[in-house]
Image: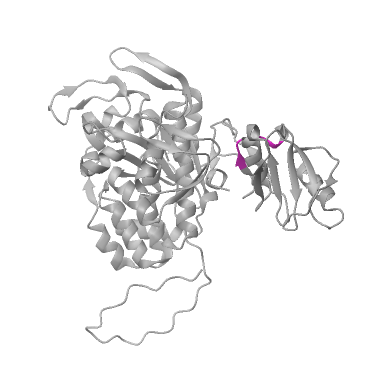
Amino acid sequence: MPTPPRSPRSTAAPRRPQPPTPRRAPRRPAPPARKPRWALRAVTTLSVVVLASAGIGHAVMTSLDADIARVDPFKDMKNRPQAGHGMNILLVGTDGREKISEEERHKYRLGGAPCHCTDTIMIVHISEDRERASVVSLPRDSYAVMPAHVDRVSGKRHHGHPVKLNAAYAEGGPQLTVRTVENMTKVKIDHYLEVDFTSFMKTVDVVGGVPICTADPLKDSYTGLNLPAGRHTLAGGQALQFVRARHVDGASDLGRMKRQQRFMAALVERLTSSGVLLNPMKFRDVTRAVLGSVRADKGFGTDEMLDLGRAMRNFSPSSSEFTTVPIGRMAYAVKGVGSTLKWDAEKSERLFHALRQDQPLSVHRPRGAARVVPVAPQQIRVQVENGTRTPGLGRRVDAALASTGFRTTRAPVNAARDVKRTVVAYDPRWDRSAKSLATALPGSELRVVNGLGETLKVIAGPDFERVRKVRAEDPGQGEFGVVRGDEVACP
């Protein structure tokens, strides 16, 4: 993929002849990573860093830098954790609904007064070699002990006291939020980024929407989300409903975080595969959509974005990993605070130790080794039929499916008639199994057959090439339940 041209120089003065620039081998730029409630805003904000590596030029970045509001979250901070390796960015998602029109607030169920607190808190760790991004979500209802501080509204001095983590922003803004997170994690924060609803919606629209796949219908009366099972391209408002929804199942905030991780992975894939990063005008539109509602520390400016972006030219969805801090006790009741989530002390310490030591969080798996599906292949029974005139195709498909874990009958037969395309026939009661099987057969067609029963049928067509490896999502993958970006995006 060729590097796009730089912004044109002014023609007011003659240019000196320049020696020819040697052509570089094309490289594929890609943005950093992946998370929760405002997962998208994390990626889009950090994508500014990566977009710079596409050759857009320092002049454009400098003009956009003026759009960023500056804060000083590190002012007069003492006794901070020791710096580790790599870069740690505290990404905070705030409310900001007052900036959205009344019509949109009604349409997307954004009623009520702004809370002036944080919807999402994430630590985004960029490895020292710039080849990996680890995103750790800190649930907003996490049990926390607020450091002693002066209330930014009343001016009253408070002693340390228990709170929910998202209250740190309400009482002391960015500085108290950074202090509280550093006290809890012992991870030194290098940069601070803060984004809100407005930048989220605008950015999704500017990139042309984000594809999302869901094996089950998603319906949430609180946000108005109503998605049937299947593949969807979400525009800004619908994407906002998707990442805010917390009543589609019993997992509440933790389930929402997993959906936000999937959304972030999908956005990374969208940015890296659609050409958005290589189009100077799109680059400008995306960054303006994000930066118009962003606040950042004074040290995270144009030069830092460019330097980091150039170092991360080979970044891709498989380079990112996502997790949530391990929870030890759900619904941990605290007097005067309410129901909180208490972290697992030992597992959390090992997680943050890995961040401090710049170590990967996920179990190493070869890139693209397996797609994540809703049902494990070992639980899916399959009868293979040869839907072509090619001798032995049925046996070849049966063997390939069996070798990747599917419970085939090991007795393929010839189909009643030929097909032009491989078909996965299934009883609607086993639709999740059918989607898992279809993922393993790229390009296959799903076909409902009422009364077929639990054994799914594969009618192999002339388009059959291979069986893709798949695996069921394992919430306990590794010690910290980590998933990679390429494992949660749409097949």
Q: Is residue 419 above or below residue 122?
A: below
Residue 423 or 234: which is nearer the viewer? 423
Magenta residue check for 348: no
In the image, residue 90 lies at what x, y percent? 35, 41
Q: Say whether residue 340 is left or right of residue 413.
A: left
User: Picture quarter containing residue 146?
Assistant: top left
Instruction: State the scheme by which the image is colored.
Output: one colour
Q: Say whether residue 437 is left or right of residue 141.
A: right
Q: Residue at x 50, y 49 (%)?
A: 132
Q: In this view, does 378 lie above or below 404?
A: above
User: Picture quarter containing residue 242?
Assistant: top left
Q: Say whether residue 128 is left or right of residue 442.
A: left
Q: Residue at x 30, y 34 (%)?
A: 118
In the image, residue 352 lies at what x, y percent? 46, 33
Q: Give the range drawn in magenta.
A: 372-377
Residue 288 or 367: which is nearer the viewer? 288
